[in-house]
Image: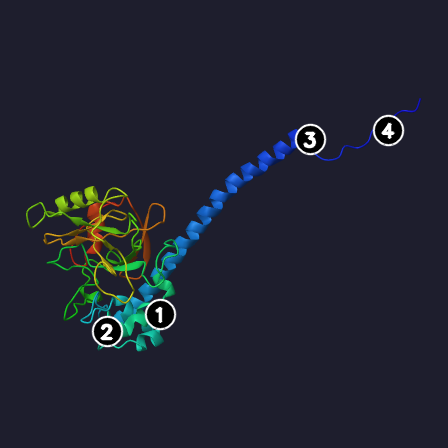
Amino acid sequence: MAMLERLPRKGLTLVELLVVVSIISILIALVIPAVIAARGMARKATCSSNMRQIGIALGGYESNYNIFPAGQNGKGYSFLVSILPYIEMKQIYSSINFELGSYENAHQTVRAVSIGIFGCPSDSERAPNYTSYAGSEGDGNARKMNGIFLQGYPYPLQVGYATIKDGSSNTASMSEWVVGVINENRKLADIHSYDGSRSDPTPLEQFEQDCISIGGGMKATTNGQQKGCAWTDGVSPSTTYQHVLGPNKPSCINSIGSDYPMAITVGSYHPGGINLLLADGHVSFIKDSINLSVWRAKGTRDGGEVMGAE
């Protein structure tokens, strides 16, 4: 009797198929977080690169005029407007009529222009013409005005390297923040009103505690304001911030008025902290856990503080 020839097996068994699917699933589970992390690192690096370019431009401006641009000049323009010629945007700079204020209707077209290096790719919901970067006003004390980019009306207040007594490598020039989106509650972008129930002047520590308390929840009531605005506008909280609270903490305006009228904070979607541009032009990544006294010391140009551990 002839023996039956055994035919070769074709295809996969169900068990083998399940094994293959499981292996692929495991590989995907391992690869996707790595890809997401890599993209996040790339966005963080781009953000840092943008800030370094702005730092170079600020250094060029200071080299020419022996002062940094004002946080807000007499017509309401931001320090970012002043450095346009130093970032190859001289044509836009030349189109501005500086006899008019920054909010005049004649400047609506300029205000709508998107400047690539003024935006951090991690904040994808930001309006294209809003800036992700803000200049430091100092530790927030309105009497001392001890930062780099100061408010001045009608005459701008300006400082240069010669007035940075704490050292340009120790003094904050600019940082990043999460920009507000109209009619949307974004915890890192919202600004809260301090209720003014305490005596004036409000002690700094009490202002700090109250601000963290009222701004601690995603659904906290805001005063209708949010951080960030068109890069042309030079008023806080449009393009400047204070070192009152640490990175990624709530922002508040002290409605009763005091030596510390507002605490507009910096923040980002980078895990664990923010990029900080120092006055000498280098960018450092600052952790959210930085010691608050060190953070405030970085905000002052002439405080004479002894820097402790971050």
Q: Which residue is mark 1?
A: 87
In this orientation, does residue 307 appear?
A: no
Q: Earlier in the sequence, mark 1 or mark 4?
A: 4
Between residue 64 and residue 185, name the one nearer to us. Answer: 185
What's under tag 1, amino acid-wise? Ile
Q: Which residue is mark 3?
A: 13
In front: mark 2 or mark 1? 1
Between residue 230 and residue 59, name the one nearer to us. Answer: 230
What's under tag 4, amino acid-wise? Glu
In front: mark 2 or mark 3? 3
Residue found at x 79% / y 33%: 8
* Disc 4 element: loop
Between residue 191 and residue 22, name the one nearer to us. Answer: 191
**Gap between marks 2 and 3 measured at Cα:** 78 Å
**Quick one: which residue is furthest to the top in this view?**
1
What's under tag 3, amino acid-wise? Thr
**Gap between marks 1 and 3 measured at Cα:** 63 Å
Residue 83: image x %, image y %? 30, 70
The circle drawn on residue 196 is none
Q: Tell me if mark 3 has few (under 14), some (14-19) or many (20+) residues whose alpha carbon lies within 10 angstroms of its own.
A: few
The correct choice, above or below, for 99 with respect to 227 in the image is: below
In front: mark 1 or mark 3? 3
Q: Which residue is mark 4?
A: 5
Does residue 228 appear to the left or right of 157 in the view shown? right
Q: Earlier in the sequence, mark 4 or mark 2?
A: 4
**Gap between marks 2 and 1 measured at Cα:** 17 Å
Q: Earlier in the sequence, mark 1 or mark 3?
A: 3
Quadrant of res 181: bottom left
Q: Which residue is mark 2?
A: 65
Does residue 286 appear to the left or right of 163 in the view shown? right
Q: Earlier in the sequence, mark 2 or mark 1?
A: 2
* Disc 2 element: helix
